[in-house]
Image (cartoon, rainbow, N blue to C red):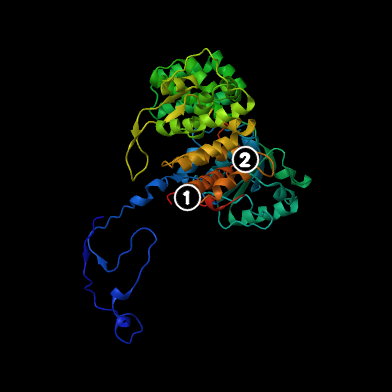
């Protein structure tokens, strides 16, 4: 602590004089502080306070930008959402329907329906003219306050039933008077009143090859690919192996991943076979196959779970999680009678190295770097899966498909000592999993940490709920551009940025 505390040289306040009803001296005041520091008097110069006692419960100094929000979307955020946008086949119809001020847009998850809605509104009001509405807003009584483009993502079923033609016509007149437009996205199976058909459009996903090609050309225009690299990437894109891939994986997000893979291949001279392998390891089939192959290995399953739940965390955190989980899996195997080792096998007291174990599950360490936290600097070596989306798909199957596995994972988290960023990383991963959970008790498992007296565990639940609430029906997690990324419990996180620093 560095400080330069000077005597109080200011004249006393009149109320501090005798008879003024106040104490005549600061010495008689008392301040009680449970933690931190309290000062009385004037402080000259700089004052620095470092609360070392909070080291073990230091929150991450990172802001999370919500994908759903109430209020204006920043222009740069809208611009980023529309990077490489390709007009879908339904775009012309939607543009014509929007002339009537309202579009009720049906879309399948991951097909880019929300991206199309942003593009339509940005056409009319500019990239800085889009405002998000609370999904629970009652559109039958809501009225626009400015001439902007309004977007409501994930229309609830109860609200949909009230949107008859008469109410929509009244809302359209109010929008016209304000110079505003409204687009409402909803799941394909949402039921609307029969007379609302003229306001409704069905989104069709754009052709994936066109998305990938446009992104590659944008990368070349930005200098991320030279002319020869662009030509090679476009030739690979037109090859049979990649056209076959896009025919089986036709969501916009798949095309984006393919374009990014080809760009990275051009930079690193990786083979096109490696690009395809990287893409395929994140599929549902690949996740099921990996778990099936590792089901008899406590080491393999625990390491998979660690990297899937804590992607990007330092290798020491990954090893600690896996080491804590292994005996819990051993107990499960013992109960099932599958833990007896062969009697003629010599014990391996050293065991395989971490690099070998990571390679066996398709994970790898990244280059060492400094800690992302601004307050404490220390080296870290993040661990990630090699394939795109592999962490999300593996964790989802591990969590939802195997009885008792969520309790094991919660138990391991409970035993871990807090590391900076652990609450954010695990909270986002768990939130994306629970966005797929079903049943009235899907969120009850969060109560264990929500009621904890340990702050970082409560923050983990807050992050998970913030992730869940951003995936309304019809916009559930997937691999498309509307996917997690990018989820009603507590609506507060939707207002601006979520500050997790305390």
**x, y (%) of residue 80?**
47, 38
**x, y (%) of residue 233?**
46, 19
Which numbered tag is attached to residue 95?
Answer: 2
Circle 2 residues within 10 Å: few <14, some 14–19, many ≥20: some
Q: Residue at x 51, y 37 (%)?
A: 412
Which image quarter is the N terminus in? Answer: bottom left
Element carrying mark 1: helix
Element carrying mark 2: helix
Which numbered disc, 1 or 2, marks the residue closer to the eye?
A: 1
Q: Is residue 384 left or right of residue 174?
A: left
Q: Quarter of the image holding residue 396? A: top right
- Residue lying farthest to the top in this orientation: 344
Q: Residue at x 61, y 21 (%)?
A: 248
Q: Quarter of the image holding residue 186? A: top right
Which numbered tag is attached to residue 455?
Answer: 1
Q: Is residue 174 left or right of residue 457?
A: right
Q: Note whether 29 is above or below 350 in the view shown.
A: below
Q: Earlier in the sequence, mark 1 or mark 2?
A: 2
Q: Is residue 253 left or right of residue 357?
A: right
**x, y (%) of residue 26?**
29, 74
**x, y (%) of residue 102?**
65, 47
Residue 463 visible in rendering: yes
């Amino acid at each position: 602590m560095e400080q330069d505390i000077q005597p109080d040289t200011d004249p006393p306040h009149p109320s501090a004089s005798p008879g003024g009803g106040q104490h005549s001296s600061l010495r008689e005041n008392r301040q009680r502080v449970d933690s931190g520091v309290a000062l009385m008097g004037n402080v000259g110069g700089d004052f620095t306070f470092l609360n070392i006692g909070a080291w073990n419960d230091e929150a991450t100094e990172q802001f999370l930008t919500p994908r759903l929000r109430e209020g204006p979307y920043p222009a740069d955020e809208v611009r980023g959402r529309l990077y490489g946008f390709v007009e879908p086949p339904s775009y012309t119809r939607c543009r014509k329907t929007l002339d009537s001020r309202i579009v009720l847009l049906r879309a399948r998850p991951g097909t880019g329906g929300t991206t199309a809605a942003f593009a339509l509104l940005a056409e009319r009001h500019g990239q800085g003219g889009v405002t998000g509405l609370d999904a629970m807003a009652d559109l039958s009584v809501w009225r626009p306050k400015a001439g902007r483009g309004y977007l409501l993502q994930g229309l609830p079923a109860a609200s949909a039933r009230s949107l008859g033609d008469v109410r929509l016509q009244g809302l359209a007149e109010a929008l016209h008077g304000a110079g505003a437009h409204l687009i409402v996205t909803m799941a394909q199976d949402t039921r609307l009143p029969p007379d609302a058909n003229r306001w409704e459009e069905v989104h069709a996903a754009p052709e994936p090859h066109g998305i990938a090609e446009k992104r590659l050309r944008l990368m070349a225009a930005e200098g991320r690919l030279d002319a020869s690299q662009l030509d090679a990437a476009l030739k690979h894109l037109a090859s049979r192996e990649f056209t076959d891939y896009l025919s089986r994986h036709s969501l916009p997000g798949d095309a984006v991943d393919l374009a990014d893979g080809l760009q990275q291949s051009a930079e690193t001279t990786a083979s096109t076979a490696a690009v395809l392998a990287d893409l395929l390891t994140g599929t549902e089939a690949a996740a099921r196959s990996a778990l099936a192959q590792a089901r008899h290995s406590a080491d393999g399953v625990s390491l998979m779970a660690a990297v899937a739940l804590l992607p990007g965390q330092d290798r020491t955190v990954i090893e600690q999680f896996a080491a804590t989980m292994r005996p819990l899996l051993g107990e499960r195997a013992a109960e099932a009678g599958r833990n007896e080792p062969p009697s003629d096998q010599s014990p391996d007291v050293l065991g395989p190295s971490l690099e070998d174990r990571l390679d066996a599950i398709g994970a790898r360490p990244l280059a060492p770097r400094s800690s992302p936290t601004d307050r404490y600097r220390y080296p870290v070596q993040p661990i990630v899966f090699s394939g795109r989306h592999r962490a999300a798909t593996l964790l989802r199957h591990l969590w939802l498909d195997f009885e008792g596995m969520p309790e094991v994972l919660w138990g391991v988290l409970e035993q871990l000592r807090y590391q900076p960023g652990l609450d954010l990383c695990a909270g986002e991963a768990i939130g994306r999993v629970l966005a797929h959970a079903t049943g009235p008790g899907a969120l009850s498992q969060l109560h264990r940490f929500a009621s904890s007296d340990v702050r970082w565990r409560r923050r983990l639940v807050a992050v998970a709920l913030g992730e869940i609430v951003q995936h309304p029906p019809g916009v559930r997690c997937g691999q498309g551009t509307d996917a997690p990324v990018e989820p009603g419990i507590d609506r507060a996180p939707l207002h601006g940025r979520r500050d997790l620093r305390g």
